Amino acid sequence: VQLQASGGGLVQPGGSLKLSCSASGVTLSSYTVGWYRQAPGKRREPVAAVQSGGVINIGDSMKGRVTISRDDAKNTIYLQMNNLKPEDTAVYYCNTFPATARLWGQGTLVTVSS
């Protein structure tokens, strides 16, 4: 069972990135799934979540700058991030919401810097 996040990288302030999370060994369609992030020296926090019926919740930290979506046919979720700021630098993870301990993967590092 694995959730593999990808798409991170180095981006300049104001730039955009789209993260992907593909699942194997677990079918995401029945779950509320979400993105989390952990900045250096800080606790992991939820960023956004999308329910199986499509209802979306966005955390205050990135409200207005992210779009979460899911493609259940591909067993994949996405996070489109725009207008990125240096404080968005973090490792981004995907998981169910609430999180399932055994599904934490390596995450993908997003670095926002000029």
Image (spheres, rainbow, N blue to C red):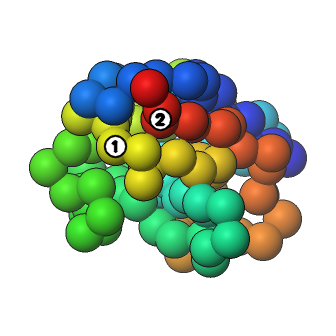
In the image, residue 44 above or below residue 18: below
| Nearer to me, 78 or 92 | 92
Along the line of sight, which residue is nearer the eye, 71 or 95? 95
Residue 42 vs residue 102, the one in the foreground: 42
Mark linked to residue 85: 1
Left or right relative to 82: residue 12? right
How far across and down, in percent of the image, does residue 9 sit?
Answer: 59, 24
Mark drawn on residue 56: none
- Say few, some or many: other residues with alpha carbon within 10 Å of mark 1 (under 14 / 14 to 19 / 20 or more): some
Residue at 84% in and 65% down: 102
Quadrant (top left, top right, bottom left, bottom right) of the C terminus: top left
- Circle 2: element type: strand
Badge 2: few (under 14), some or many (20 or more) residues near its Cα, within 10 Å?
many
**Residue type (three-letter) at the residue carrying disc 2:** Val
Gap between marks 2 and 1 measured at Cα: 6 Å
The amino acid pointed to by label 1 is Lys
Q: Residue at x 32, y 37 (%)?
A: 84
For residue 70, above or below residue 16 = below
